[in-house]
Image (cartoon, grey):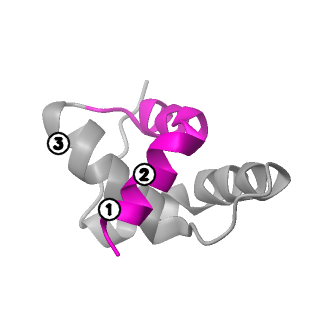
């Protein structure tokens, strides 16, 4: 399978926007507001992904969609 190569974190972030949108819609369905793409990105980048190497795009999408709402809320509150 071909690997995706990204020239920058910004390029990777843009590729993940559809997954962020799915998670944000899920949060809204659960009546959770105030968490945006950057919050999800920063949380995963600084807690999940920093410890891992050779992540695939699919693993990142899965992490975005499955990260718990509580973890995101706690992260947002602690980073105000």
Q: Are marks 2 and 3 in contact (CB under 8 Å)?
A: no
Front-most of residues 41 and 10: 41
Question: Residue 78, relative to residue 4: is it above or below?
Answer: below
Q: Earlier in the sequence, mark 2 or mark 3?
A: 3
Q: Are marks 1 and 2 in contact (CB under 8 Å)?
A: yes
Q: Quadrant of residue 25?
A: bottom right
From the image, state whether disc 2 or disc 3 is nearer to you.
Answer: 2
Q: Secondary structure at mark 2?
A: helix
Front-most of residues 21 and 7: 21
With 46 as the anchor, is 35 left or right in this view? Answer: right
Instruction: Name the residue that disc number 3 marks.
Output: 50
With 77 as the anchor, is 79 left or right in this view? Answer: left
Bin the neighbour count of mark 2 within 10 Å (Cα to Cα): few under 14, some 14-19, many 20 and up: few
Front-most of residues 26 and 9: 26
Front-most of residues 20 and 6: 20
Q: Which residues are magenta?
A: 55-80
Bin the neighbour count of mark 1 within 10 Å (Cα to Cα): few under 14, some 14-19, many 20 and up: few
Question: Residue 66, relative to residue 50: is it above or below?
Answer: above
**How far from the left and from the top, in percent, is residue 5?**
30, 50
Instruction: Name the residue that disc number 1 marks.
Output: 78
Q: Are marks 1 and 3 in contact (CB under 8 Å)?
A: no
Q: Is residue 31 magenta?
A: no
Instruction: Name the residue that disc number 2 marks.
Output: 74
Q: Is residue 70 magenta?
A: yes
Residue drawn at x 75%, y 48% as measured from the top left: 26
């Amino acid at each position: 399978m071909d690997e995706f190569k990204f020239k920058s974190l910004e390029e990777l972030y843009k590729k993940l926007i559809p997954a962020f949108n799915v998670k944000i819609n899920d949060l809204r369905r659960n009546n959770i507001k105030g968490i945006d793409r950057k919050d999800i990105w920063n949380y995963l980048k600084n807690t999940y992904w920093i410890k891992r190497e050779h992540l695939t795009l699919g693993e990142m999408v899965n992490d975005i969609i499955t990260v718990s709402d509580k973890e995101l809320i706690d992260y947002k509150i602690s980073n105000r």
